[in-house]
Amino acid sequence: MDHISTDNSQQFASDNYSGICPEAWEAMAEANHGHATAYGDDPWTARASNLFRDFFETECEVFFAFNGTAANSMALASLCQSYHSVICASSAHVETDECGAPEFFSNGSKLLTAQTIDGKMTPESIRALATSRGDIHFPKSKAVTITQSTETGRVYSVDEVRALSATCRDLKLHLHMDGARFSNAMASAGCTPAEMTWKSGVEVLCFGGTKNGMAVGEAIVFFDQALAQDFDYRCKQAGQLASKMRFLTSPWIGMIQSGAWLRNAQHANAMAQRLSGAIEGVPHASIMFPVEANAVFLVASEDHLEQLRTRGWRFYTFIGGGARFMFAWDTDPARVDQLANDIREIMG
Ligand SMILES: *Cc1c(COP(=O)(O)O)cnc(C)c1O
């Protein structure tokens, strides 16, 4: 194969810039022997599904999709009719980064967005939206989606999730969790996956494998099995049923059995702490949101941010205007230190 040259100096614009972690890679290689039945009727998929049941300590239904946009969209579509609405934060990925896929997959269920200070929904924000209209001219509220950890790098505590789900129950709304960075939240939260989800009233979780260190793949976990009815058909119709499913599911076995799911997230979170700690007190830089997962949002003048770009750093500023730095399982601490030094030199 021709050599394709890459720039190996790490960038932190997205945690998806990282590659595949060894545990996921090896599990895929192990599954790559001989033939196996296609479309998920294979021993790796059965094993992965059972591991999720152990992981969450309950008889959940598990499905696998290629990416988070599809996972979220199919999950929300399964909770709603076309005339329903889904309540989310205005900064939610489903609203800002899925190109209308949740509305498309649900044949028109409308997203109702709550303004938040830091990306976190509150019981009050849900109640205000859900009760704002009760007439036939407005879509009927049916579900709430929260992101764990949030797009702003914050983590809902178990108590906060419980308070949200109590509000949902009261208002007869389903509760979905976008867990594209569920592992990062778990590394920070100090509770069990079961406590963070079904024991706190979450009915469906989209559990992200990609940002956690896999090549590709998200698991859709239904804690309320009745809600999973016919979901396999929905996956197939959406073009999300992998024929060589074992390569989507075997990495989960590697990730969960080896503990890499948590180690990877702990490392990523630690790298966010490393950066935020190193730039604390820099006169012309401030940190926008409490650093609780693997994100740091830097607030600085446009001139200073441009100087950072000139030094070769890449980052996005589409969330709240801050410069976002995301860390991954393979983040090199020395590279974080370089970034911190550049920030200190420019903004000190
Ligand atoms: C990355 C991400 C997703 C999934 O995005 P895809 O690119 O579709 O895999 C979903 N939700 C959040 C909050 C994300 O950050």
Image (cartoon, rainbow, N blue to C red):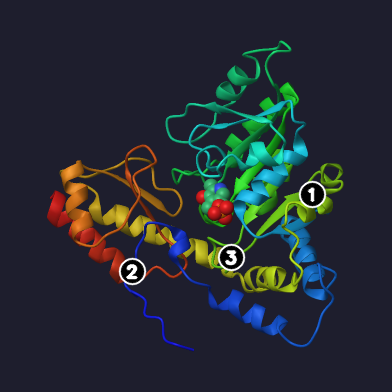
- For residue 234, which numbered disc appears in the image? 1
Q: Amino acid at mark 1?
A: Arg
How much space separates mark 2 and mark 1, taking CA atoms?
42 Å
Given residues 55 and 342, the one toward you in this image is 342
Secondary structure under tag 3 reads helix
Q: Does the CB distance between marks 2 and 1 fall below 8 Å?
A: no
The residue carrying pointer 2 sits among few (fewer than 14), some (14 to 19) or many (20 or more) residues within 10 Å by Cα, namely some
Given residues 86 and 128, the one toward you in this image is 86
Instruction: Judge left or right: residue 173 versus residue 320.
Output: right
Give x and y (percent) for residue 20: 53, 73
Residue at 82% in and 72% down: 38
Instruction: Judge left or right: residue 54 versus residue 348.
Output: right
How much space separates mark 2 and mark 3, taking CA atoms?
19 Å
Between marks 2 and 1 in the image, the one whose residue lies nearer the viewer? 1
Q: Amino acid at mark 3?
A: Trp
Mark toward the start of the polypeptide (2 vs 1): 1
Question: Which residue position is annotated with label 2?
Answer: 333
Q: Amino acid at mark 2?
A: Pro
- Res. 347 visible in picture: yes
Secondary structure under tag 1 reads helix
